[in-house]
Amino acid sequence: MFELRLLAPEERIETLGDALDALDALSISVEDADAQTDAEQALFGEPGMPPPKEGWQRSRVIALFATEELARDAGSVLALQDFFEGCTLLGIAELQDQDWVRLTQSQFAPVEITPEFWIVPSWHEAPAQATQVIRLDPGLAFGTGTHPTTRMCLRWIATRGALAGQRVLDYGCGSGILAIGAAKYGAGEIDAVDIDEAAVSSTRLNAEANGVTLDAGLPEAAQGQYGTVLANILATPLKVLAPLLCERVAPGGSLVLAGILERQADELKEAYAPYVALEVSDSEDGWILMTARR
C-alpha cells in the first residue's frame, strides 16, 4: 500500500477528490495542514450553523493506492492539470503492513459508566469490578459509550434506581445503547426508535448480543406514554421535538435529554417550558444532561 500526499487550498479539495477517485485511489482523507499550530482552523459547525466546508484553508490530502506505480502515475497526471495550480505534491511513501483489525480494536477499551457499570467491546474481558456490562462493538450507528452525552445518559439510568418494570422509550436510539442500558436496569417494555433504518438494525443486533428484549423500529412505532423517555440527539432537533417527546411522558414520568452544549441550556429550557421544567442534572466536557418530571 502506498500513500500519495498533497497540499491543497480549500477551493481545490472537491476537484482533487473527484480526480483521485477517478485515478483509482482506494481511500482519500483530508486533514488540516495547520493542525496543532496557532493557525489551526475549526471546520465543523453545530446545528444551526453553516454546513461544513470541503477542506481547510491549507489542507493535506492523503490518497491510498494499491501500488507505487499507481500512486506515481496519479501524482504525474494531477500535476499536469489546470486545477492543480496552487497545489503541491508532498511525496509518496510506502505503508507498512499492519493487522488493521487488531489496530482498530486496540483503539477501543472498556468504558466506565460507574465503578460497577461498564461498556465492553466483545474482544475485551470485563473489568473484575463490573457487575453490569453492555457488550458493544463500534459499528454503523452512534453510541458506543465513548461520548460524554452517552455516558451521562447511562449514568442517569444506572443511578436512578427507579426503572424496574417501567415502560421506556429511547428516541433516536442509534446503536440502542440507552435502551439496552434501561433493560439491564430492570425496565419492562422498551421501545427504541430511530429515523435511520441502519440504526434500527444495529439496535436489534446489539440487543440480541446482550440478551435483552426490546422493540426497535421507526419513530411511528412509539405509541402511548412511557415512564421514562430518553433522547440523546442534538439541541436543534430536541427543540423541534419538544411537543412530541413531552406528550410521550406519562404523568409523574421522567424526560431525559442529551446532546446539549452547556451554552444551549437556556434555549432548551425555553423550548420545553410550556410542557415541563427542565433542569441540568449532569455535565461533562462542555456537554450537559437535562431532565424533567412531568
Image (cartoon, rainbow, N blue to C red):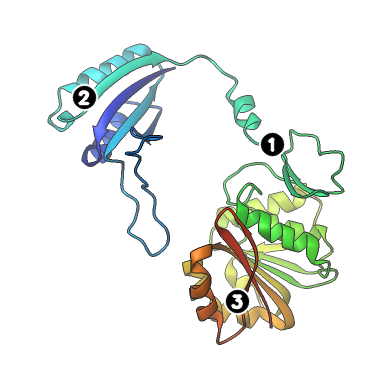
Q: CA distance from mark 3 to mark 1?
A: 33 Å
Circle 3: residue type: Leu
Query: In the image, is residue 29 above or below residue 193?
Result: above
Q: Which residue is mark 3?
A: 245
- Name which quarter of the figure residue 200 lies in: bottom right
Look at discs 3 and 1 and give the one toward the viewer.
1
Q: Nearer the viewer, residue 213 or 252?
A: 252
Q: Is residue 32 left or right of residue 190?
A: left
Q: Which mark sits nearer the N-terminus, 3 or 1?
A: 1
SS for dot 1: loop
Q: CA distance from mark 2 to mark 1?
A: 41 Å
Circle 1: residue type: Ala
Q: Position of residue 18 (x, y in %)?
A: 28, 36
Circle 2: residue type: Leu
Please give the name of the residue rendered at 72% of the width and 82% of the height, measured from the top-left corner: 250
Please give the name of the residue rendered at 68% of the width and 60% of the height, measured from the top-left corner: 153
Q: Which residue is mark 2?
A: 78
Find the residue positioned furthest to the front: 38
Q: Which residue is mark 1?
A: 109
